[in-house]
């Protein structure tokens, strides 16, 4: 739950408008460059990015639009799709594949001279939920032969970040630079610390000048008080919608668990708890939350 006293100080980066404001506009290009370079650790770092309009991906035959939080291209012609998902959806992987393939399809050229010169497409999803029974913070996927490291093509690279897995009490507990940046974003979401407190954490951590500049740049842009009146109006409206959606989701989960447990206690059956836990797993709720709600152990939940 976000702390009301800090609402006017730090922007929630998981509100759709907030994420685009921090990473998806020309003014904030340095933030996105820093994030991608920390996340990808490429042999040749990205030097420049060009934001692409959503219109660069046309409607399909049924009229569905491919809309991303951020779509951009670097100086090598490689493309990056970056999106935030706050609610669990069962088809998240298929969605990522579909959008990435649409971009590959656009690279085709007519005529015999084209030699299938396909540029890389990176599809990156920050998820405020877990989608698997034994989740980890980061999953990277390439096209490769099953059971081997024999890669068919490196032109499609999918990265799924399951943010609930990053349970660090302090920025110093994070192992990599991209984890440290994700830690800051999660702290900004909770609203429990002011921008000044988060900046002090960055200074105290002893990061090198370049990494510190990336982190401080994001925090500097996250000052809600620096927004124009019109920007603040838009952000507040989107923040309210974000909170309403989260409240509805939390209530639905709580109500379902409570009713199910009451029924189970009336029957006095352990099987009812297990059934509820299994149902929650099918909704992509993480094991720790299920265990807490059902009074089962994490081991019992993961064994289902």
Image (spheres, rainbow, N blue to C red):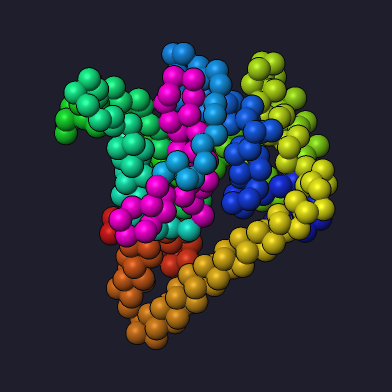
Quarter residue 251 falls in? bottom right
Q: Is residue 139 visible?
A: no
- Taking the spot 65% from the left edge, 59% from the top edge, the residue there is 238
Quarter residue 31 falls in? top right
Out of 189 and 259, give the one closest to the viewer: 189
Out of 28 and 204, give the one closest to the viewer: 28
Q: Quadrant of the N terminus?
A: bottom right
Out of 27 and 177, give the one closest to the viewer: 27
Q: Position of residue 76 (x, y in %)?
A: 44, 19
- Taking the spot 39% from the left edge, 83% from the top edge, the residue there is 263
Q: Residue furthest front?
A: 111
216 vs 58, left or right, is right
Q: Position of residue 96 (x, y in %)?
A: 36, 45
Q: Is residue 10 visible?
A: yes
Q: Give yes or no for residue 29 being in the magenta stretch.
A: no
Q: Residue furthest top?
A: 44
256 vs 203, left or right, is left
Q: Quadrant of the C terminus?
A: bottom left
54 vs 220, left or right, is left
Q: Give yes or no for residue 85 being in the magenta stretch.
A: yes
Q: Position of residue 262 (x, y in %)?
A: 44, 82
Quarter residue 297 falls in? bottom left
Out of 218 and 255, give the one closest to the viewer: 218
Q: Position of residue 168 (x, y in %)?
A: 58, 39
Instruction: Count up the numbered dots.
Output: 0
28 vs 122, left or right, is right
- Taking the spot 45% from the left edge, 75% from the top edge, the residue there is 256
- Taking the spot 61% from the left edge, 45% from the top edge, the residue there is 19
Point out the stretch of residues depicted in magenta: 58-86
Q: Is 58 above or below relative to 208?
A: below
């Amino acid at each position: 739950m976000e702390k009301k006293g800090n609402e006017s100080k730090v922007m929630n980066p998981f509100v759709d408008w907030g994420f685009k404001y921090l990473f998806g506009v020309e003014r904030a290009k340095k933030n996105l460059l820093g994030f991608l370079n920390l996340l990808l650790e490429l042999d040749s770092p990205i030097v420049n990015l060009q934001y692409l309009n959503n219109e660069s991906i046309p409607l399909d035959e049924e009229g569905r639009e491919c809309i991303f939080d951020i779509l951009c291209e670097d100086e090598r012609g490689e493309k990056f799709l970056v999106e935030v998902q706050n609610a669990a959806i069962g088809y998240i992987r298929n969605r990522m594949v579909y959008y990435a393939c649409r971009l590959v399809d656009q690279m085709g050229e007519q005529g015999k001279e084209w030699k299938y010169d396909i540029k890389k497409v990176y599809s990156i999803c920050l998820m405020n939920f877990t989608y698997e029974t034994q989740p980890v913070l980061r999953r990277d996927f390439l096209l490769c032969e099953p059971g081997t490291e024999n890669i068919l093509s490196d032109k499609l690279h999918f990265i799924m970040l399951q943010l609930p897995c990053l349970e660090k009490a302090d920025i110093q507990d994070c192992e990599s630079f991209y984890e440290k940046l994700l830690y800051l974003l999660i702290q900004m979401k909770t609203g429990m610390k002011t921008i000044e407190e988060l900046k002090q954490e960055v200074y105290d951590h002893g990061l090198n000048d370049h990494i510190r500049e990336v982190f401080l740049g994001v925090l500097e842009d996250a000052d809600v008080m620096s927004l124009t009146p019109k920007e603040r109006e838009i952000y507040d409206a989107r923040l309210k919608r974000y909170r309403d959606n989260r409240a509805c989701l939390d209530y639905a989960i709580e109500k379902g668990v409570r009713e199910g447990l009451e029924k189970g206690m009336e029957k006095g059956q352990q099987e009812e708890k297990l059934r509820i836990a299994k149902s929650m797993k099918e909704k992509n709720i993480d094991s720790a939350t299920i265990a807490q709600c059902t009074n089962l152990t994490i081991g019992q939940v993961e064994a289902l």
